[in-house]
Image (cartoon, rainbow, N blue to C red):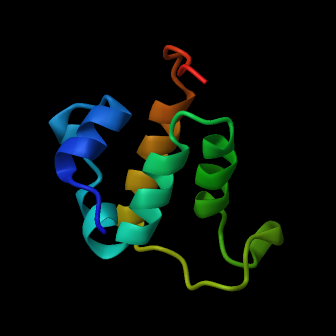
Amino acid sequence: MMVSRETILQTLKCLPNQYPQLLHEKYPHIMEKIIELWNSPDGEDYLNDLLQPNGRGGGRLDRLGFSEKVWWEIYRLNELYKKPRPKSAK
């Protein structure tokens, strides 16, 4: 099941112009995982892993990589993730 745009905006607490549209459309499974991990300590590792180049400097060899636009959406999500926010209730 694909997460909705509304769920993404609410979970990320981002502005509509920060909505990762290409990532959501082309890689819905990755968007779901980001939403799932957004309020957990594992989110940062997951986003950092997605941003790794393929093979160069120890990056992952098992994927082709993202288009530049999708990569920038992930990068912006990573920056948003690093901003302080209320801790989620456990």
Above or below: residue 48 compared with residue 27:
above
Which residue corresponds to the image point at 16% horizontal and 38% vertical from the top-left?
16
Image quadrant containing the C terminus: top right
Q: Position of residue 45 (x, y in %)?
A: 69, 48
Q: Position of residue 83 (x, y in %)?
A: 51, 22
Describe residue 9's horizontal placement relative to residue 72 as left or right: left
Describe residue 41's horizontal placement relative to residue 38 as left or right: right
The residue closer to the viewer here, 63 or 38, is 38
Q: Residue furthest front?
A: 90
Which residue corresponds to the image point at 73% horizontal and 75% vertical from the top-left?
60
**Number of callouts in the render?**
0
Tell me the quarter of the picture where residue 87 sits.
top right
Q: Position of residue 15 (x, y in %)?
A: 22, 31
Q: Position of residue 82 (x, y in %)?
A: 56, 29
Tell me the quarter of the picture where residue 51 sits.
bottom right
Above or below: residue 51 compared with residue 55:
above
Which residue corresponds to the image point at 63% horizontal and 54% vertical from the top-left?
46
Image quadrant containing the N terminus: bottom left
Which residue corresponds to the image point at 42% horizontal and 70% vertical from the top-left?
29
Q: Residue furthest right?
A: 58
The residue closer to the viewer here, 67 or 21, is 21
